[in-house]
Amino acid sequence: MPITESAVLFDVDGTLVDSNYQHVSAWVRAFVEVGHPVPAWRIHQALGMDSSKLLDELLGDAVDELGDRAKELHAQYYRESADQLRPLPGARELLRTLHDEGKTIVLATSAPSDELEILRGVLDADEWVDATTNADDVETAKPEPDILQVALERAGVDASDAVMVGDARWDMVAAGRSGIRGIGLLSGGVDREALVEAGATETYDDAEALRAAL
């Protein structure tokens, strides 16, 4: 039984919704348009970070000049690709199963509130979700632990009674900084070794595989 804790905190992009590569594409286009091309693999490695940290990482000294415009363009291009988004295999079923088992479920994402609304629409699972938190709730999102601290408060549990499920190394780092156990999923394109090195205690291919292990 991989989840004995009473609250389960979920990342969304790449964990429950197949959206990581739409994000990569949107950032690629944004960085090209502002005149600072960034290789797609570097963007993929930074996914899951707070957008300000992602921009610092990828734009370096040019962030003050180009960061705001790049962020606006990413948001525009990502919204334009929203019709391509789909729930990942087993995602809705996993949420329903955990809800039926009496778990408290919180969506805890580094995405801003408008992107979270898109993701919730795609996932269509609000009936099994108890609370959400997003980048707009804190000064700095993952890998800082702040979002997960808000999620714990909204779940009404201590860190020792919660588990974080995510696809990015930054999910696992934030969980570790919060004292929360982390379960990594490979569905966002990050390999097993990287997730374990970042602190994942267990890894599964995707939500469907995690549900099968319950």
Image (cartoon, rainbow, N blue to C red):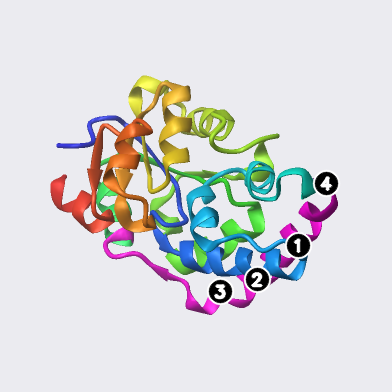
Crowd around label 2: few <14 · some 14–19 · many ≥20 (10 Å): some
Q: Marks 3 and 2, how far apart in space?
A: 15 Å
Report if residue 75 is visible in the image. Answer: no
Q: Marks 1 and 3, how far apart in space?
A: 16 Å
Identity of the residue drawn at 57% across and 46% down: 110
- The residue under label 3 is 82
Identity of the residue drawn at 59% across and 45% down: 134
Label pair 2/4, CB-CB below 8 angstroms: no
Start-end of magenta stretch: 64-91
Q: Does residue 62 appear left or right of residue 76 in this picture?
A: right
Q: Marks 2 and 4, how far apart in space?
A: 19 Å
Q: Marks 3 and 4, how far apart in space?
A: 28 Å
Quick one: 33 or 73, which is closer to the camera? 33
Nearer the camera: disc 3 or disc 4: 4
Among numbered discs 2 and 4, the one appearing first in the sequence: 2
Nearer the camera: disc 1 or disc 4: 4
Q: Marks 1 and 4, how far apart in space?
A: 14 Å
The quadrant where residue 7 appears: top left
Among numbered discs 3 and 2, the one appearing first in the sequence: 2
Q: Which x, y percent locates residue 69?
A: 80, 60
